[in-house]
Image (cartoon, grey):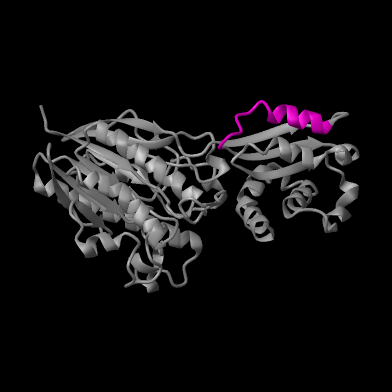
Amino acid sequence: MAQTVRAMHFADTHFGVELYGRLDPSTGLNTRLQDFRRSLNEAVDSALDAGVDVALFAGDAYKNRDPRQTDQREFASCIRRLTEQGIPVVLLAGNHDMPAIRGRAHAVEIYRTLGVTNVHVVSHSELLTLDTRSGPLRIAPVPYLLKGISMARDQFQGKTLEEGRLLLEAHYVETIGALADEVRALDDQTPTVLLGHFWARGARLSAWQQGYFSLTEPQVPLDALTDPAFDYVALGHIHRQQDLNPAGQPHVVYCGSSDRIDFGEKDEPKGFVIADIRKGGAEYRFVEVSGGRRMLDIVVDADCDDPTAAIIAEVKRHPLRDSLVRLTYDISRARQGLVRTVEIREALAPAFLTVSLSARVQRDTTARHELLDESKSPREALSMFIDTREQLLPLKDRLLAAAEPLFVEIEAEIA
């Protein structure tokens, strides 16, 4: 039987995201950082219990490329739990980890600079062979390509956004093809993993990512990834877990993120992948973790004689404790004055945090002037504006979801 190496495949931990968090006075840490650490530690526990030989991180350790020392410390504490068990860890640089300027250090480069035992940082497309307790494993890394760094500036001069996207896609294909040729030239029995951080064509975006992914983002064609030189393709960047080649080899797998960032991901399973990799292919399984704090998106039809009672009755049907709650109620303009907001907020008090409490008032095209009413919150104003634009109505939920981080920031500043 061919040698098999068991790998932990994880990605997109995004330490430093504080959306919907608050300060924990007992630790001094933001509660979202604690949530993200708890989810990653849960994944590490499961990986150690499964007896993994190696851990492959497919990019985006932090929220941005200049992480705070506290975020670095908390991420490092999770990684150390693997390395202390003699498990080599490969850290690939993702788009949130990479600097925009050539010559600047990326977010995970400090591990390489310090020479941390059992941690291998990869930010260039060069083959790496690891010794694991089950035998060697070869890594073919493909980090996220930034236009200003990965290619000469003059290649993009005079090009449209679409032409620039096609240039980057071609560069990905060329890079992956060159790595595959190198693997074939070695002609040995060492299993090989293509470890990448990019958008593969056909991958379904996380609902949250749909709000900000650009159509100019390059998408790598699937046939470039299914080269038989690779025995498993471990990808990061897309937060939704999926296999783009489920019926064949190599499997092309996004492990997804280990925690939910936004309400757009509230129903998506979160976790990591355990892959048994051998020369010629791999078998894998997705291991779900708790995914952090529960996100409740409560929608109530409150257009009745006692809308407050209807809203509270619906709220009491949900497990509020330790949850993040977003409450939206539908109501006619004539009954809007019957809503007793103070009582509703009291009913929501057991929740960890009420992210928003907003009304969707039945459309009234004669009331456009109310958009200028200073009593309206930014969330209500945007909702009312969308209601007056036929072309925006189909996009209303996505537009409000995309704007939600701004609303939360504004409310925090006011508080």
The C terminus: image quadrant: bottom right
What span is colored magenta in the figure?
Answer: 307-322
Residue 285 visible, this orientation: yes
Q: Tell me which corner region of the image, top left, top right, bottom left or bottom right, holds residue 230.
A: top left
Which residue is at 22% across, 38% downward? 231
The N terminus: image quadrant: top left
Q: Tell me which corner region of the image, top left, top right, bottom left or bottom right, holds residue 369.
A: bottom right
Q: Position of residue 33 (x, y in %)?
A: 45, 50
Which residue is at 41% across, 42% downward? 38
Q: Is 266 positioned to the left or the right of 409 in the image?
A: left
Q: Where is residue 360 in the image (x, y as percent from the top left)?
A: 77, 41
Q: Tell me which corner region of the image, top left, top right, bottom left or bottom right, holds residue 361.
A: top right
Residue 130 is inside the magenta segment: no
Q: Image height check: is 135 above or below 316?
A: below
Q: Position of residue 266 (x, y in %)?
A: 54, 37
Q: Image height check: is 139 above or below 243?
A: below
Is residue 414 or residue 271 the one in the foreground? 414
Residue 310 is inside the magenta segment: yes
Q: Is 28 positioned to the left or the right of 398 in the image?
A: left
